[in-house]
Structure formats: C-alpha cells, structure tokens
Amino acid sequence: MIIRKSHDEIARMREAGRVVAGVLEMLEKHIRPGTRTETLNELADEYIRGRGGTPSFLGYRGFPASICTSINDVVVHGIPGRERLREGDIIGVDVGVILEGYHADAARTYAVGEVGEVARKLMEVTEEALRAGIRACRRGNRLGDVSNAIQRTVEAGGFSVVVQFVGHGIGREMHEEPQIPNFGPAGRGPLLEAGMTFALEPMVNEGSYEVEVDGEDGWTVRTVDGTLSAHFEHTVAVTEEGPVVLTLP
C-alpha cells in the first residue's frame, strides 16, 4: 500500500530534506583530492546531529556509517573509510536524515578535481534522468511513466540503467511502498495521487547494467565490468500543483 501524507507530514519531510540538502552542499567544499571518505562521514554526522536530526543510514540493517560514499565503479552503498579521493575520481554521496519522525533521502555524484569527458557526461545524463523522473511525478500519471522517463533519458545518453536496485516510497519509514524501478513501460503501475512521497534515484552505468555486491562487506555494490557509475536522488512529493522536491536548500 502506498501511504499518502498530509500537508503537515509533507512539511515535516521538507524540514528533514533541508538538512539533507545542507549536508550535500557542505560536503561539496570537502570533495577534493586527498580527502578521506571517513572524514566526509564525520562531517556529515556532525552536521545532521547539530540540526537535531539523526542519520537514517547508521545502523540500518547493520550499515556502519552515516552516509554512503561510492567511488568510480561503486554504484551505491559504499562504506566510508580510510580511502582518499584522487584527482579524476567521481564519488556518489547518499544522505538520509530522520527529523521529528520523518525521513528524507537524496544523493549526488561529485567530480573530484578535473574528470574525463565520459565521467562528466555520465553525471550530466544521470542528473537529467532524475529531472525527467521528477517531471513525470504528477497526479494522474502512472508510476511506470516515471520509470520510463528515467530509462529513456539514460539510454538516449548512451548509458545503461541499473535494474537490481530501485527507488522507493519514503515517509515515516526510510523505505516504504512502492519500489520504483528506473526502467519499464509507460502507462503502467499505480496511479499517482496527491500526498504520495517518493525517493527517485537513477543509478546509471557507463557500460553494462550488471552489478554485484561485495562478498566481504556485504554492502558495496560495484559494476561487474569495472566501468563508472553515477547516482542522483531526490525526495519528491506529488501534490495537486505538481511535483515538489523536498530535498532542496
């Protein structure tokens, strides 16, 4: 069942979303060669708690950090640690915050210094795919319209959509119904209604769509062919007036 939220509940999610957006803005200043990913995690944790929130990810099913940091061929769920960023890397940072009982969730992929043309295009196409999904997130559309808009944008850009991991509903729980694939035909799936809130998150690979989970840590998801991957995400509310992004400053 897709849980519809009241105006008050959406307003609460918006406040959590402001904290998420603030983390992503703050970290941008620290995304540079030489920075350890554990430093990004410490900065994010301090920022979130300093604004009365709690990191949604820390302890979720045993996840050991407050944010996810996914470098180059890591698609999602990278665990911060001693690794240092290098010139030319790309890094996806995923942030979730719970504030006064409501979650918000967003991700962004950053360039570390100067990156290659393929990496730059991959990030641009992934972010545009997210925008296309948000535009389709309108009352009266079907959920498949959102998925299809994302897939068409990605494939028109020459890249592939990850199929093993998907977006999701969000609200009092970090993961609510429905699952939101980043692929599929338009005109199918649940009818979108005002009050629904979704975390849209295209995960896009340079090469094959195939991914695998690290057998040692059980979290880190990498591309099978070792090519780059990018990830952008926003928490979005369907309203009578159209889609509203809740994870902006």
Image (spheres, rainbow, N blue to C red):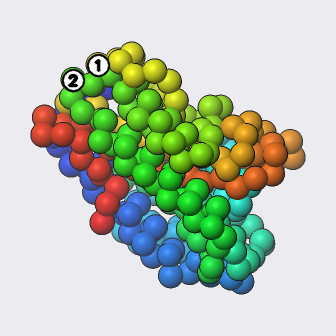
Badge 1 marks a residue whose secondary structure is: loop
In the rendered structure, the answer to whether residue 28 lies left or right of residue 159 reads left
177 or 116, nearer to the observer? 116
Q: Which residue is mark 1?
A: 191
- Above or below — where is 83 with respect to 148? below
- Above or below — where is 177 with respect to 92? above
Q: Tell me if residue 53 can be seen.
A: yes
Q: Tell me if residue 79 can be seen.
A: no
Contact? badges 2 and 1 (CB < 8 Å): yes
Which percent across, then down, holds residue 4?
A: 26, 28
Mark 2: few, some, or many residues within 10 Å (few <14, many ≥20)? some
153 or 101, nearer to the observer? 153
| Residue 117, picture quadrant | bottom right
In the rendered structure, the answer to whether residue 188 lies left or right of residue 215 reads left
Q: Earlier in the sequence, mark 2 or mark 1?
A: 2
Outermost right residue: 216
Which percent across, then down, holds residue 191?
A: 29, 19
Which percent across, then down, holds residue 118?
A: 64, 61
Q: Which residue is mark 2?
A: 140
29 or 22, nearer to the observer? 29
Mark 1: few, some, or many residues within 10 Å (few <14, many ≥20)? some
Give, as a three-letter code, the residue at label 1.
Answer: Leu
Residue occupying the point 34% across, 55% down: 247
Residue occupying the point 42% across, 47% down: 130
Badge 2 marks a residue whose secondary structure is: loop
Q: How many marks?
A: 2
Q: Which mark is residue 126?
A: none
Give, as a three-letter code, the residue at label 2.
Answer: Gly
In the rendered structure, the answer to whether residue 194 lies left or right of residue 41 reads left
Which quarter of the figure is the N terminus placed in?
Answer: top left
